[in-house]
Amino acid sequence: MDISLTNSRTRKKEPFRPIDPENVRIYVCGPTVYDRAHLGNARPAIVFDVLFRLMREVYGADHVTYVRNFTDVDDKINARAKESGRSIGEITAETTQWYLDDMAAVGVMEPTHMPRATQYIAQMVAMISELIEKGHAYEAEGHVLFAVESYTAYGALSGRSVDDMIAGARVEVAPYKRNPMDFVLWKPSEPDLPGWESPWGRGRPGWHIECSAMAEELLWKTPLEEGRLSEAALAHPHLFDIHGGGNDLTFPHHENEIAQSCCANGVEHMAQTWLHNEMLQVEGKKMSKSLGNFFTVRDLLDGHDGLPGVPGEVIRFVMLSTHYRKPMDWTAEKAREAEATLRKWRAMVDGVEVGAVPEGVLKAVADDLNTAGAIAELHKLAGAGDAAALKAGAGLLGLLTPELGDWSAVSVDLTALADRLAGARRAAMESKDFSEVDRLKSALLAAGVEVRMSKAGVELLPGAGFDAARLEGL
């Protein structure tokens, strides 16, 4: 299966040719763990989970290594510890587990490796030392900074000149910098802040060096030590295959990663292909606390502000209904439509043996992760009644999987309507006027609700094609 991906570095959709088909290597920037993941954080996790599933399908599960990190040393974490009075370790352990639980709830598989920055301080110190030795970094007043002027390709990923980057970014002004664009690799730590001993004194790493060090260790040095790098990979001008993240990370984070990794390792490029997903909106507006449309993944799962919870599979479906390179707009209407579709599909595939992934679905996902196109193919399969192919194709997208569970019977509370129908039936038994009973029952059936009436009472269950929106105003 030919795979094409839009490479942010070249700004072109290109055929994907792995450096080593036996060892496809992917790195994606993960969260800074100081609070709950908001809905926007879920988008890259879901997008690159589909990439992981695609590569496993095409090259084999044992031939793909996917690394997604946790940043557990950061000024935001320090501030949260100070304001809450809790320890940094307690906060990062809790929020890391929150993230894992919330991502699992939307069907995200765990990557091959999930390194924490604090586990790789030694590797960061070694990379910084190498950059100093090669003339790409310098020490100043307890800090170590990367000398941007020493790397002539700086700005190639974002397509900006250094002057443009200075004008368009909030550059930290510091007297010890040789150039305003120079960025921190290591900084001193006060006694009340996390710190590690280094050749430059007790301190902590800058943000950008973390990903460079962890990617190098897990996608280059470890496979090298284990003999899992082919001669072609050793001679290749890239360290690994794919680096991904949100497009808000392109500059300065990814730009700085490239500079560090290329200069430290003497390679032309850090990654062969760069993938960036677009940002998320809510009801057509940028997600913002000031607009009242900011919420976490857990808020959405559990329900918030009087709104019912949204199943994780529904969240995933809505996310994948928009191409990753386009802005994604979360709306309540899209969630309702997704829930109705998934209920119908789950009813179709219940008890069905999964088949091979249909060619149309696989081709769509292989065409620059066209998940919207893949979902269109799933609709065709559902319309044709091909349940086995539907189940297999949906599985490639992480939908209709056992891991997400059968939420359809428990995600909506129909108790009030059941009580209301039961009351109408009791009244009708006395008045002999069943018009209200018939009206309610017809409306429920039209909304895809299974109505069970017996001497014991009334039971309502969401059925295939259930549409909660049709119950509004009933």
Image (cartoon, rainbow, N blue to C red):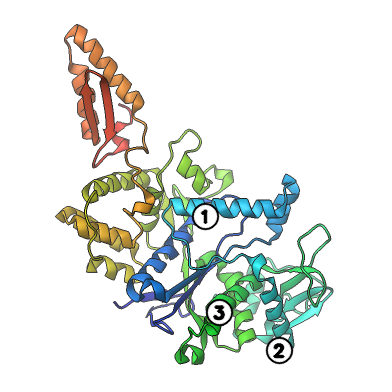
Residue drawn at x 23%, y 66% is 358
Give the class, few, some or many, for how many residues have Cα within 10 Å of label 1's Cα (few <14, many ≥20): some
Along the line of sight, which residue is nearer the eye, 404 or 13? 404
Instruction: Please state if 208 lies on the left or on the right of 291 as rendered.
Output: right
Residue drawn at x 72%, y 72% is 184
Residue 255 locus on image (x, y percent): 59, 75
Q: How many marks?
A: 3
Residue 127 locus on image (x, y percent): 68, 80
Give me the disc on residue 100: 1
Circles 3 and 2, Cβ within 8 Å, touching? The answer is no
- The secondary element bearing badge 2 is classed as loop
Q: Quadrant of residue 399?
A: bottom left
- Quarter of the image containing the C terminus? top left
The residue at the far front in this view is 226
- Residue type of the residue flagged with mark 1: Leu
Mark 1–mark 3 distance (CA, rounded to whole Å):
25 Å
- According to the picture, the residue beneath numbered tag 3 turns out to be 222
- According to the picture, the residue beneath numbered tag 2 turns out to be 134
